[in-house]
Image: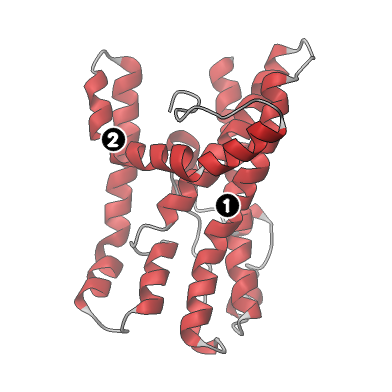
Amino acid sequence: MDQLIFYLASILAVIFVFAPHEFAHAYVAYKCGDPTAKMRGRMTLNPLKHLDPVGFILCALAGFGWAKPVPIDPYNFKNYRKGLFLTAIAGVVTNYIIAFIGYLLLLPVMYYWTSGLYELWLFFFYFFRNLFVFNLSVFIFNLLPLYPLDGFRVVEAFTRQVNPVQRFLRTYGQYILIILVVESFLCGIVIDNTALYFFKYFDILGYIQWFAVNILGYPIRLIWNLVFGLGVPPLVFLGL
């Protein structure tokens, strides 16, 4: 039952990761002069318009994934480089804000929950915890300079249109991403079901997630812990 609750909470949390992320891309692109995403129905919070089935499942299971890229035409931007850069980072900035809110909602569940219904408590615990962790993970994951992630768009904004590095990242980026996510997922299975704990040292995305939660997420945890009178949080959070 606990595992079922975990997966239900994870699936719901993923919706609150990708739908606002992609909406932010579309909205900022529109404000910068490109109506492409709006005309194609992507300037919406409807998750069905944004979710990529493979990326959605991988995020729910491993904490990393992707949505369908929002279509943009950077030549419509009033300022090409500025518009491309702002549109690229809009999604991850939104993820960080949601992580900020997610941790705020997690603390009352962890420390002030008074209801005796364990299953309901567990659902909200997993949901807000994953809202915090997944948004931070997608924040750092999307800044990897691999197509079709936002980090690739940032590279595009500050480099020449045609160069061998950009061409390589565009051609092979998606394959590298799939390998990284699958490798992380398989390492997790081995660690959870065997005594081969040394596999955690091969989990590349595990290091990235640790950095996201413990370094990028530390200011969020510090602020809200102090607000709630919980003191300075430790570096390691929830076993990550």
Residue picked out by circle 1: 95
The type of residue carrying mark 1 is: Asn
Give the number of the disc on residue 204: none
* Residue drawn at (56%, 65%) of the image: 90
Task: Determine whether, in the image, residue 43 is placed left or right of residue 68.
Answer: right
Task: Determine whether, in the image, residue 223 is placed left or right of residue 117.
Answer: left
Q: Nearer the viewer, residue 9 or 91?
A: 91
* Residue drawn at (48%, 74%) of the image: 85
Sequence order check: which comes first, mark 1 or mark 2? 1
Q: Quadrant for the N terminus, please.
A: top right
- Number of numbered discs visible in the structure rendering: 2
The answer to whether 139 is drawn above or below residue 173 in the figure is: above
* Residue drawn at (50%, 37%) of the image: 60
Q: Nearer the viewer, residue 86 or 39?
A: 86
Q: Quadrant for the C terminus, please.
A: top left
Give the number of the disc on residue 203: 2
Label 1's element?
Answer: helix
* Residue drawn at (52%, 42%) of the image: 217
Label 2's element?
Answer: loop
Percent x, y of residue 206: 35, 36
Percent x, y of residue 104: 69, 37
The answer to whether 179 is drawn above or below residue 3 in the figure is: below
- The answer to whether any part of residue 71 appears in the image is no
The type of residue carrying mark 2 is: Asp
Bin the neighbour count of mark 2 within 10 Å (Cα to Cα): few under 14, some 14-19, many 20 and up: some
